[in-house]
């Protein structure tokens, strides 16, 4: 179930997977302009956001990262460097639903995107090390 796309020379598509979710069953797929599809990154969970920073590193937004059903305050942002090494940039998010880089490389994430009363949503500025 594709849930997000980023364009970075190619299309990078994240998937949410089915519930109950199993740890690491989501992927980031790379789709070339000619239509070739391959897994670019695996082992992620419940992906709702994909973005690249100005250093061409891949960021993945997991709306929750525990097996089972959506669980609040378990969302996180992962960063993959060029070698594939993964680092957690933010954690403890409550059902984040999207992220984007703004001016000057600032990362913004929507938090409380679902499962909370109307008006609970917020945009969070994430400090990127």
Image (cartoon, rainbow, N blue to C red):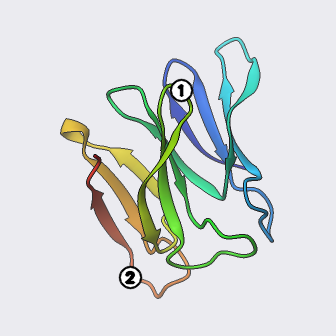
Vertical placement of residue 73 versus 40, above or below: below
State the CA–CA distance, disc 2 to disc 1.
38 Å
Q: Residue at x 68, y 24 (%)?
A: 31
Q: Nearer the viewer, residue 42 or 28?
A: 42
Q: Is residue 23 above or below residue 111?
A: above
Q: Position of residue 84 (x, y in %)?
A: 56, 32
Q: In this rendering, does residue 80 appear at all?
A: yes
Name the residue tied to disc 2: 120
State yes or no: discs 2 and 1 in contact (Cβ < 8 Å): no
Q: Position of residue 124 (x, y in %)?
A: 30, 64
**Of the two numbered discs 2 and 1 in the rendering, the one whose residue sits closer to the viewer:** 1
Would residue 61 appear left or right of 40 to someone viewing this image?
left
Residue drawn at point x = 48 percent, y = 71 percent: 113
Which residue is labeled 1 in the image?
Answer: 83
Q: Secondary structure at mark 2?
A: loop
Residue at 76% over, 74% down: 68
Where is residue 129 shown, x and y percent of the image?
28, 46
Compared to 79, does 9 lie above or below? above
Q: Nearer the viewer, residue 28 or 65?
A: 65
Q: Nearer the viewer, residue 33 or 76?
A: 76
Instruction: Answer with left or right where residue 99 lies relative to residue 68.
Output: left
Mark 1 surroundings within 10 Å by alpha-carbon count, few (fewer than 14), some (14 through 19), many (20 or more):
few
Q: Which mark is residue 27?
A: none
Q: Is residue 97 visible?
A: no
Dividing the picture into quadrants, the one containing residue 37 is: top right
**Label 1's element?**
loop
Q: Is residue 71 left or right of residue 91?
A: right
Residue in the image at 53% along x and 75% along y: 114
């Amino acid at each position: 179930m594709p849930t997000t796309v980023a364009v970075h020379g190619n299309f990078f598509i994240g998937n949410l997977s089915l519930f109950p979710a199993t740890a690491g069953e989501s992927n980031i797929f790379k789709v070339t302009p000619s239509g070739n599809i391959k897994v670019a990154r695996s082992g992620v969970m419940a992906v709702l956001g994909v973005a690249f920073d100005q250093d061409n590193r891949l960021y993945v937004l997991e709306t929750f990262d525990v097996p089972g059903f959506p669980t609040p305050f378990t969302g996180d942002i992962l960063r993959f460097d060029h070698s594939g090494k993964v680092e957690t940039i933010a954690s403890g998010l409550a059902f984040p639903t999207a992220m984007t880089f703004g001016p000057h490389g600032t990362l913004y994430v929507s938090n409380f995107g679902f499962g909370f009363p109307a008006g609970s949503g917020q945009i969070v500025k994430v400090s990127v090390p």
